[in-house]
């Protein structure tokens, strides 16, 4: 991923023991991220590993949003995605994604 000219920043953190992982990427333009996500090796990996994300006791969250000039910390990103992101429980959609109204990361009402 780091060789993609449209990718400005990427961070991957996780805990193998706890089964927790988070990927944060910042792109020049949203359409570039969508092209990457749905094409090439990433698309292959996404389909190949879907059994990991969508089976068993897995809780998955996904969110695409504008950075508005500020990249959130790992902790802020985790709070934003669990509060506003598309949420899957064992592969079943629980909640559709919402966009945060402001940057202070308050929970939706």
Image (cartoon, grey):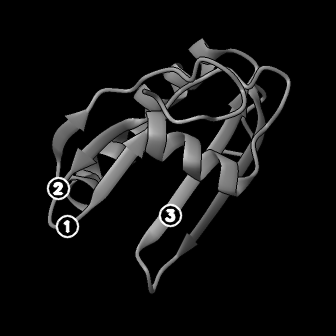
What element does badge 1 sit on?
A: loop
Residue ID for mark 1: 57
Q: Quadrant of residue 100?
A: top right
Q: Residues within 10 Å of mark 3 (few under 14, many from 20)?
A: few
Residue 68 location, x and y as percent?
Answer: 78, 20
Residue 101 location, x and y as percent?
Answer: 59, 17
Q: Which of marks 1 and 3 is nearer the N terminus?
A: 3
Q: Quadrant of residue 24?
A: top right
Residue lying at 46% horizontally and 40% vertically, measured from the top left: 83
Residue 47 location, x and y as percent?
Answer: 27, 44
Does residue 106 appear to the left or right of 69 in the view shown?
Answer: left
Q: Residue furthest bottom?
A: 17
Residue lying at 76% horizontally and 50% vertically, measured from the top left: 73
Q: Residues within 10 Å of mark 2 (few under 14, many from 20)?
A: some
Q: Residue 21 carries which label?
A: 3
Q: Between residues 59 and 6, which one lies in front from this camera angle?
A: 59
């Amino acid at each position: 991923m780091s060789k993609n000219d449209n990718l400005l920043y990427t961070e991957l953190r996780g805990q193998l023991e706890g089964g927790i992982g988070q990927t944060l990427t910042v792109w020049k333009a949203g359409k570039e991220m969508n092209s990457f996500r749905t094409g090439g090796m990433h698309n292959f990996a996404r389909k190949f590993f879907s059994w990991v994300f969508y089976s068993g006791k897995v809780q998955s969250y996904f969110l695409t949003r504008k950075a508005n000039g500020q990249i959130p910390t790992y902790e802020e990103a985790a709070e934003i995605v669990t509060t506003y992101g598309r949420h899957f429980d064992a592969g079943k959609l629980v909640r559709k994604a919402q966009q945060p109204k402001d940057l202070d990361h308050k929970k939706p009402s």
